[in-house]
Amino acid sequence: MAEAGGKPRLAGKVALVTGAGSSGPGVGTGKAIAITLAREGAKLMLMDRDPGRAGETLAAIAEELGSRDIGAVCAGDVSLLADCRTVVDTAIARFGKLDILVNNVGISRNTDVLGLKEEDWDAILDVNLKGMALMASAAIPHLLKSGHGAMVHISSVAAHRPSGTTVAYAAAKGGVEAMSRSIAVTHGEAGIRSNCVAPGNIYTPMVAANMDERKRRDRRMGNPMRTEGTAWDIAQAVAFLASDEARWITGQTLIVDGGYTAAPIGWFTAQQRKAGDAQP
Ligand SMILES: NC(=O)c1ccc[n+]([C@@H]2O[C@H](COP(=O)([O-])OP(=O)(O)OC[C@H]3O[C@@H](n4cnc5c(N)ncnc54)[C@H](O)[C@@H]3O)[C@@H](O)[C@H]2O)c1
């Protein structure tokens, strides 16, 4: 929200958000992050492989804030270096500088290590890990020119508490957190910060297709707050880490999960059992 005195936290900043659309009806993290950064006063370059989806995000921002001049859309695939460079160059051409990169794109497929298909491993690592490194490498020269900058990469609790069926996803997200710390160390002296936000089991279009009411209830019971997180919870954490309020925070991961990773091993199963017992 706005600082005392009414100035939005990101006034005057230019932010690039990758995967700024939503893969289905509702609000995914990329869309929520873009809308939240715009509310905080940032100008936005919205990148998505599907520009129509990012266009919907821009339209939602325009409708709420009353101006299309707040942002622009650029089509691109984060797993291709040429596309990453093009979207960064387009942001510079449009807004003159870059202050913030939000590496949001991530895809998921079930992969257990014994039945692992090489193409699944390659697809997930290409998008979820290489894509974030390529975007960072395209953005950093411009952040260096600005003399400051903030990067926020979207990880996952899967990097900390992986399930056995998401081996490639967990490996990619663990890599994202290590990559982020490495960037923080290399570019800290130049005033560039690099942090991660690790969402817990939030309800977004990315997971909605595989959810029913029972699974949603189990997920609620699986964290100490007994509530379900949303993309907006993630967006608030990103806005904070992107802002100057976080000026001395770098190389860190902020886990946003309703306490899921704080609970002792076995807690989740015990809660599920209790919930099951309570059912008729
Ligand atoms: N939903 C959850 O429960 C959850 C939990 C933990 C972490 N996350 C992380 O949140 C992030 C994304 O969440 P979301 O809800 O915005 O996802 P989403 O599925 O809604 O996707 C956002 C956008 O990314 C775009 N996209 C996909 N591949 C792309 C590529 N190669 N290049 C450019 N754009 C591409 C899609 O077109 C889509 O519009 C991911 O990093 C994901 O791993 C989600």
Image (cartoon, helix red, strand yellow):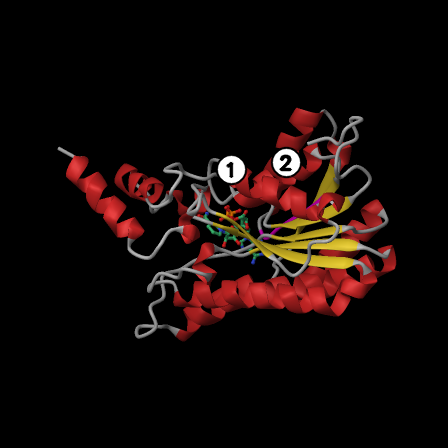
Tag shown at residue 280: none
Q: 49 or 194, which is in the foreground?
A: 194
Q: Quadrant of residue 36?
A: top right
Instruction: Decide: few, some or many residues near mark 2? Use Cα within 10 Å; few <14, some 14-19, many ≥20.
Output: many
Left or right: 245 in relation to 172: right
Q: Quadrant of residue 53?
A: top right
Q: Give the residue at x 73% y 53%.
A: 248
Q: Give the residue at x 73% y 30%.
A: 2
- Gap in angstroms between the C-alphas marked 1 and 2: 10 Å
- Residue at image mark 2: 35
Say if 221 sits above or below 141 in the image: above
Disc 1 to disc 2: CB gap under 8 Å:
yes
Which quadrant would the N terminus be assigned to in this image?
top right
Q: Give the residue at x 60% y 39%.
A: 236
Left or right: 120 in relation to 60: left
Tag shown at residue 27: 1
Left or right: 124 in relation to 90: left
Instruction: Decide: few, some or many residues near mark 1? Use Cα within 10 Å; few <14, some 14-19, many ≥20.
Output: many
Q: Please, what secondary structure does the residue beneath circle 1 have?
A: loop
| Amino acid type, mark 1 | Val
> Residue 47 placed where, x, y %?
65, 50
Left or right: 111 in relation to 186: left
| Amino acid type, mark 2 | Ile
Say if 42 sits above or below 267 in the image: above
Q: Residue furthest front?
A: 264
